[in-house]
Structures are given as C-alpha cells and as structure tokens.
Amino acid sequence: PKASNAAALVVEQRADILRSLVPTGTINPELWLASLMVELNMLSKPCSNVSIATAALNAAFLGLQFGKSLGHAFIIPSGQEATLVIGYKGFRHLAFETGFLKTLHAEVVCRGEEFNQWVDELGPHFRHVPAADRNPSRDDITHSYVVYTTRDGGSGTKIVPRSELNRSDKQRDVWKSDYASMCLKTAILKASK
C-alpha cells in the first residue's frame, strides 16, 4: 500500500529497518509491514512518530498483525499519541500461542435469544441458543461470554451481563464501530483475571 499520511510515509521510508526488527519466526515481516501501512493510512488523527513506532514494534514482538481482517491489533489515536489496542482475536491468538489454551469460544447474546443460567450441585451452568438470523447490534446485546478449556484439563466460563459491558464501554471509536467485538474482548479479558 502507498502512504497517504505523514506516519505512513515515515514507515514507507524506513521499511527495511522496521522489517528487520520483526522477530524471526513470529509473523511474516512483509505481511506485518503491509498491515501496518493500511492501519496507519486509516488513522483519524496525527500521532507522534515515537508513539507509532512503539505501538508497531510492540505488536510485532507479540506476533500480532494490524487490521480488521485478523482483528489482532489496532493503532488508536489518543490525543497526539498512538496506542496499541489488542483486539479480542489478538488475545485469543496469544493465549493459543503460549500453549495454555486448548479451546476458547466467545459469543454475544442478543435480545430474544434463549439464554438461561443456573447453579446446581455441580456448579454454575448456562444454555444459549443463538438465533439463526442474528445480527448483533449495540441495542440488542444483553450479555457476552467465553468458555474455555486449558491444555492441562482445566476449564472455565465467564458471563458478562450488559451492566458490566456498559461499565467497560469507554465510548471510544472502536466501541462505537465494533461493539460486538468489544463485548467479546471484555469477556475474554475478565476470564483471564
């Protein structure tokens, strides 16, 4: 991709240096650089070159690529600074890369879908039946949850009700443009604590 702003132009001019800083064996340096260029071309505000380089290299060291297609990582402007924000798919990727997780399933629950929670002598349980024609939107989401199993045989579930999702929603652009993904990320983050 061609540079369409000052930050992307700096990356374009320093491509060889940046490519050499990507750790060997983590991600393809060419694809990572292309994803970075696309991400920078979409920045809504100018950010300092140092903060962009820091966010970009942190993503590279973690083995995360930028952009919505993978959903691993994003560069979000905060004032004049660029901030690396790891998406829920990035957290999922990191959990699998460490070998800790065996399975992970995150989902949102929409208004009108079957969703029941209960506790019995075996512990907490829930049942969710997603609608076939669902289109999760901010107004329809009532919960998010994650179910996981670990390589050593452990398992866990975290259900996040709408009230907790609302407390996590900082009204940043990403919460406005991709609410369902942010709800999934919230469930994953809360399960990891």
Image: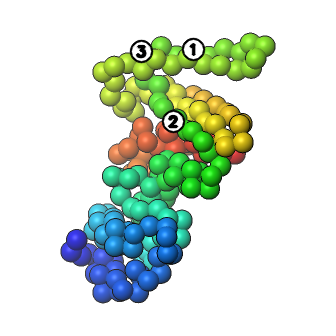
Residue 115 lies, in percent from the top left, at 52, 16
Query: Considering the numbered disc 1 on the image, is that residue within a helix, a strand or a loop?
Result: strand
In this picture, is 174 found above or below 64? Answer: above
Q: Is residue 13 visible?
A: yes
Q: Position of residue 156 (x, y in %)?
A: 67, 33
Picture layout, residue 112 above or below residue 186 = above
Type of the residue with mark 1: Asn
Q: Is residue 162 visible?
A: no
Q: Can you give x and y, in whole percent of width and height, for residue 128 in the image?
A: 51, 19
Q: Which quarter of the figure has residue 138? A: top left
| Residue 49, image quadrant | bottom left
Q: Residue shown at 62%/45% (left/top)?
A: 101
Q: Is residue 152 left or right of residue 94?
A: right
For badge 2, the amino acid type reads: Ala
- Local packing at callout 2 (Cα closer than 10 Å; few below 14, some 14-19, many 20+) is many
Q: Residues within 10 Å of mark 1 (few under 14, many from 20)?
A: few
Q: Disc 1 designates what residue? A: 116
Q: Amino acid at mark 3?
A: Gly
Location of mark 2 (residue): 106
Viewer-side label of 3, 1? 1
Pointer 3 residue: 112
Of all residues shown, which one is farthest toward the right? 121
* Residue contact between numbered discs 2 and 3, judged by CB atoms under 8 Å: no
The quadrant in which the C terminus is found is top right
Q: CA distance from mark 1 to mark 2?
A: 16 Å
Give residue 151's quadrant in the image.
top right
Q: Earlier in the sequence, mark 2 or mark 3?
A: 2
Is 3 in front, or is 59?
59
- Classed neighbour count for the residue bearing mark 3: other residues with Cα under 10 Å, few (<14), some (14–19), many (≥20): few
Q: Position of residue 118 (x, y in %)?
A: 66, 14
Residue under the image location 53 percent in, 48 percent down: 92
Q: Secondary structure at mark 2?
A: strand
